[in-house]
Amino acid sequence: MTEGLDADIDTTDYLTAERARLLDRIHEHAGGIARELARLEGGDYGRRAFRTDRGEWTVKYEAGVLEFLLFDPNGGEKTYVISTKQPPEPAALAEAMSDYAAFVEAYNAFVDSQAGMLDDIDPTFPAVRSAERVVVERDRIVEAITAVCTEIAQQCYRYEGTNYGLFSTTVDGTRWELKWEEGAVSYLRVGGENGVYLLSQYGQPAAQTVRRLADDVPPFVTAFNAWIDDLDSTLTTVSFESVES
């Protein structure tokens, strides 16, 4: 009943150590292929397959680092030669390595096929037009809008008696909102919560935005003046004429 229980058991230490050394070499070598593919194809991640007579190899990489190397033989089981999971079985690894040289040749052929692809591209491009004049005009108009909105903010500050507030109205069916704090403009937003900022503390609006909305600033000011008139107060009426260019 106990026959054989005293027999020595061979360890797999040597085999696993040899496999680990081989996988380290493969990882270093195939990792070079992954780095070159990342340089050639761009992007943070990618994958490419290479055909050989005996199957297909797939290289997957992220940030230029090899994620896995997969060998899919014709009519056989797939083998992840390199992966983040367990190492391959020795027999499967041996089968894959018998085709590894062909895989490298397929990769080299792919690189060679890319040579000369950009030879006909003329790197001489038209001069870039300066946007300086547009920017200057945009800034001039925004400065005028800022001036009139600051005057509105100061009038609201005087009238409301609070440190901050919001004046809102509708111009041609679109909501306009001027938020102010202590007499200074926080923002002028058009279109509600998901609208565009004609004035803000975070930078200038696009020139196209200014072009589209500038003609609606006078009606916005007129609406404020009408609001003041309705309050029957003695506040000074705002005029956009003082900031016209």
Image: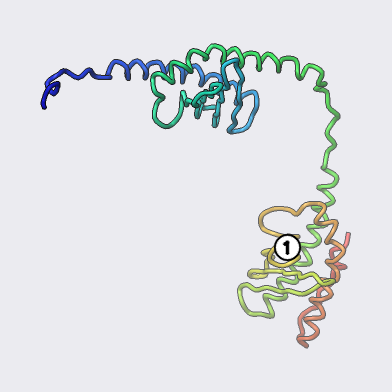
Single out the residue that lies furthest toward the bottom: 232
**Disc 1 crowd, CA 10 A, few/some/many (<14, 14-19, 20+):** few
**What's the residue at 47%, 25% (across, down)?**
79
Which quarter of the rendering shows the C terminus? bottom right
Q: Position of residue 58 (x, y in %)?
A: 56, 25
Relative placement, left or right, of 112 versus 244 is left
Mark 1 lies on residue = 195
Q: Position of residue 179 (x, y in %)?
A: 68, 69
Relative placement, left or right, of 237 versus 35 is right
As shown in the figure, which amino acid type bears the numbered disc 1?
Answer: Gly
| Residue 127: quadrant of the picture | top right
**What's the residue at 54%, 11% (across, down)?**
101
Which quarter of the rendering shows the N terminus? top left
Q: Is residue 38 above or below residue 142?
A: above
Q: Nearer the viewer, residue 211 or 29?
A: 29
Q: Position of residue 111 (x, y in %)?
A: 65, 16
Q: Is residue 226 above or below residue 183?
A: below
**What's the residue at 65%, 73% (across, down)?**
165
